[in-house]
Image: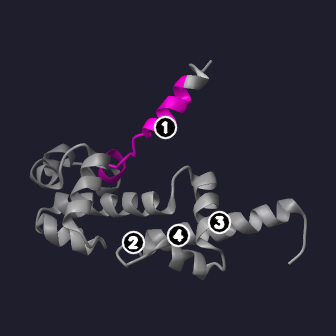
């Protein structure tokens, strides 16, 4: 395909959006950057760099955030164990799942399962999802870079 650099940039953004949409839909499947890149006829390295530039995080971090977000909803229901939730959202390691969950949510999944319902009791599900959405804390490197830039005016 030919066209201006702007046309190419728009095509690349559309490809990245398709990758992100696929992760949103298929979060419970075993997805990896290689397979996602292959589906859009990109190299894994290019996909990773472009995804981070467009969305501010790696494809892996985005996928784990989606998985943890879904896990939070399942844990609030209270009818599945932490292990069942881990596998239901596509994680293959309970240890990795628990570590990532704790990093994003601030408490281990077992504590969230026990206490999470109380924090959203009586809320409509759409509001509960928004209020409990996991937020990835800035990395040490990003915090250091922000500090070096100084306070925002």
Q: Secondary structure at mark 3?
A: helix
Q: Position of residue 18 (x, y in %)?
A: 59, 72
Q: How is the image coloured?
A: one colour
The residue that disc 4 covers is: 21
Which segment is the magenta one? 128-147
The residue that disc 3 covers is: 46
3 or 4: mark nearer the eye: 3
Q: Is residue 129 magenta?
A: yes
Mark 3 and mark 1 lie on one chain; the one further toward the N terminus is 3
Mark 4 and mark 1 lie on one chain; the one further toward the N terminus is 4
Q: Which mark is residue 141?
A: 1
Marks 3 and 2, Cα distance to the nearest angstrom?
A: 21 Å
Marks 4 and 1, Cα distance to the nearest angstrom?
A: 28 Å
Q: Secondary structure at mark 2?
A: loop
The residue that disc 2 covers is: 27
Label the magenta part by its dominant secondary structure. helix
Marks 3 and 4, Cα distance to the nearest angstrom?
A: 18 Å
Locate the N terminus and report the quarter of the image it occupies. Answer: bottom right
Marks 3 and 1, Cα distance to the nearest angstrom?
A: 22 Å
């Amino acid at each position: 395909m030919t066209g201006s650099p702007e046309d190419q940039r728009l095509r690349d953004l559309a490809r990245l959006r398709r990758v992100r949409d696929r992760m949103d839909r298929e979060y419970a499947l075993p997805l990896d950057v290689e397979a996602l890149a292959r589906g859009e006829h990109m190299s894994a390295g290019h996909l990773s760099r472009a995804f981070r530039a467009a969305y501010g995080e790696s494809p892996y971090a985005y996928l784990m955030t989606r998985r943890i977000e879904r896990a939070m909803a399942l844990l609030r229901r209270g009818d599945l164990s932490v292990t069942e939730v881990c596998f239901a959202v596509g994680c293959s390691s309970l240890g990795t799942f628990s570590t990532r969950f704790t990093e994003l949510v601030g408490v281990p999944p077992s504590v969230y399962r026990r206490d999470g319902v109380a924090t959203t009791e009586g809320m409509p599900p759409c509001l509960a999802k928004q209020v409990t959405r996991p937020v990835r804390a800035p990395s040490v490197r990003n915090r250091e870079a922000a500090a070096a830039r100084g306070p925002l005016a």
